Image (tube, rainbow, N blue to C red):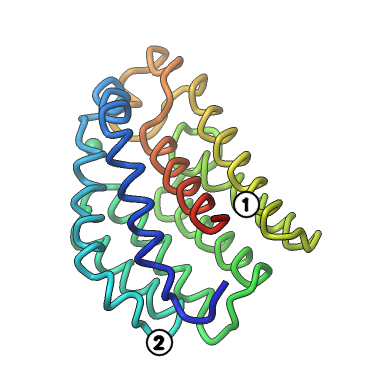
Amino acid sequence: MQSTPSILPDLIDAVAATIESHAEEVTQLDQTLGDGDHVTNLQRGLKKLMEQKEALAAAEDWSAAMQKIAMSVMSTVGGASGSLYGTLFMALSKGLKGKPVDLPTFARAFAEAVDAVKKRGRTEVGEKTMVDTLAPVADALLTAADASLPLAQVLHQVRQAAEKGMESTRDMLATKGRASYMGERSRGIIDAGARTSQLMICAIADRLGA
Ligand SMILES: [Mg+2]
C-alpha cells in the first residue's frame, strides 16, 4: 500500500457504490431482524466521508486518516454501528501509528481493531453480527501475511473469508440487539451488519486489486 492515503477517495467511492446498489436487499434483511435503519445510517456516514475525501487523501499518513474517519463515523452514523465502526477505525489508527503500512503491519492492526470491536460490542464470533464477517477477515489477513502471499492472492483470501463469514450468520441464532427478540425465528436470515461489512470489504478488495 502507498505510504500516504491518496487512494482513500477511490475506496470511499467503491464502498458507497456497493452500499447504494445493495440498499434494498440489506434494508429488507434489517427490516426483518432489526429496525430497518442500518443502510440509512451507513449512507449518512458515507455522505460525510465523501465530503471529506480531499482532507482524507491529504492526511499525513494512514493513521491520521483512520482517526479522521473514526471521528466522522462516530458523529454521523450513530447507533450501535456508529460506535462499533468508530472503534474499528480508532483502533486501526492506533495500530498503524508511526509504522510503514505493509501487509504484516496492516494485518496486525486490523486484528487488534476487530478485537476492540468485540470488546466494545461485548460480542464474540457466532452471535450473528458484523464480527462474524470481520473476525475471519482478520484471520485471513494474518495467515496471508505469515505466508507472504502476493497481493492478488491476499485479496482473494480476504474476499472468500468475508463471504463465508457473512453467509455463516444465516443459520445463527441472534443474541444481540433487537434481532435477539426474534429468538429461533432469527435463523435463516443473514445479519444486515455482517452483509454490509462483507460488501464494503469486498468492494475495497476489488478496488485494491484493480
Ligand atoms: Mg437499527
Q: In the rendered structure, which amino acid carries the disc numbered 2?
A: Glu
Q: In which quadrant will I find the C terminus?
A: bottom right
Q: Residues within 10 Å of mark 1 (few under 14, many from 20)?
A: many
Is the residue indicated by label 2 positioned so its CB lies within 8 Å of ligand 1? no
x, y (%) of residue 188? 45, 15
**Sooner in the amino-acid sequence: mark 2 or mark 1:** 2
Residue picked out by circle 1: 155
Which residue sits furthest front?
210
> For this rendering, which residue is in front, 201 or 192?
201
Q: Is residue 205 shown left or right of residue 88?
A: right
**Cα separation between marks 2 and 1:** 26 Å
In this view of the protein, which residue sits in the foreground, 23 or 142?
A: 23
In the picture, the quarter occupied by the N terminus is: bottom right
Judge by depth and name the residue closer to the eye, 46 or 37: 46
Q: Where does label 2 land, which residue? A: 60
The quadrant where residue 28 appears: top left
The correct choice, above or below, for 55 with respect to 141 in the image is below
Residue 121: assigned label: none
Query: Element under label 1?
Result: helix
Name the spot of residue 153 as percent of width and height, x first.
Answer: 71, 51
Determine the residue positioned at 53% across, 57% down. Answer: 115
Residue 97's place in the image compared with 121, above or below, is: below
Is residue 66 left or right of 134 when viewed as pictured? Answer: left
Q: Position of residue 156 (x, y in %)?
A: 65, 46
| Residue at position x 60%, y 53% in the image | 138
What is the residue that sits farthest to the top in this orientation?
185
Identify the residue at image location x=36%, y=42%.
Answer: 18
